[in-house]
Amino acid sequence: MKPTLLAVLPLLAALAACQPVIPQPPASAAAPSGEWEAATISGSRNESDDIIKVNVATGAAWIHCCGSNNSNYFIVKDSSPPPAGDYHLVTWSQVAPNGDVNWNAYRFDRKTGHTWVIETANGAYFWSGIDTTVTVQ
C-alpha cells in the first residue's frame, strides 16, 4: 500500500465510528402530571356547560367556560399555592326560568378539611378560603 493510503485509513475508521450530530427539536413544556378530578356545571338554552378540573395532589385547578366556541382552560388562581393534599371538587347549579345558570364550585382537601369557594373578579377566577372552624353554641 502507498504511505498516503496507510495514513488515511485510520482517519476513515475514526470517522466511521463517529455519531452524527442531529439537531433535536426544542423540548416542549411537559403537561402537569398526577391524577385529576373534574366536575361539570350544567348549562341551559342560554349558557354553555362549564368544566372545572383539579390536580388531586396539588390542588391546582383550571376552568373551561365562557362560551361553546372557547377551547381554552383558564387557571383558577390561588393567593398562595395550597399545600400538598387530597383535593376534590363539589359543584351545584340551578337554571333560572329565564335560562340563566346560577352555580358554585368548591375545592376541599380531604386530609385537612380546608375548603375554598370559586369566585370571579374582573374576568378572572380565584379560590377564596372558607373558615371551616366549627363553633359550638
Image (cartoon, grey):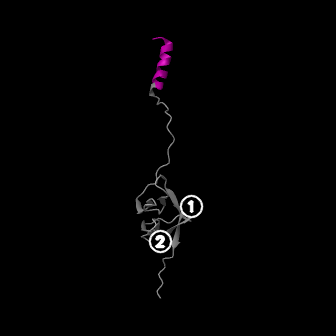
Q: As shown in the figure, which amino acid type bears the numbered disc 2?
A: Thr
Point out the residue furthest to the top here.
2
**Residue position for label 1:** 123
Residue 35 magenta: no
Instruction: Classify the position of the N terminus by image quarter.
Output: top left
At which x and y percent is residue 90?
42, 68
Closer to the chain start, of discs 1 and 2, is 2
At which x and y percent is residue 119?
53, 67
**Residue position for label 2:** 115
Q: Which residues are magenta?
A: 1-15
Q: Nearer the viewer, residue 100 or 109?
A: 100
- Image-quadrant location for residue 110: bottom left
Q: Nearer the viewer, residue 76 or 64?
A: 64
Q: Nearer the viewer, residue 121 or 60?
A: 121
- Image-quadrant location for residue 57: bottom left
At which x and y percent is residue 60?
48, 61
Q: Residue at x 49, y 18 (%)?
A: 8
Total numbered labels placed on residues in the image: 2
How crowded pointer 2 is (Cα within 10 Å; few <14, some 14-19, many 20+) is rated as: some
Q: Residue at x 51, y 57 (%)?
A: 74
Q: Main secondary structure of the magenta part?
A: helix
Nearer to us of marks 1 and 2 is 1
Q: As shown in the figure, which amino acid type bears the numbered disc 1?
A: Gly
User: Marks 1 and 2: CB-CB under 8 Å?
Assistant: no
Residue 11 magenta: yes
Q: CA distance from mark 1 to mark 2?
A: 22 Å
How crowded pointer 1 is (Cα within 10 Å; few <14, some 14-19, many 20+) is rated as: few
Point out the residue furthest to the right here.
122
At which x and y percent is residue 111?
42, 70
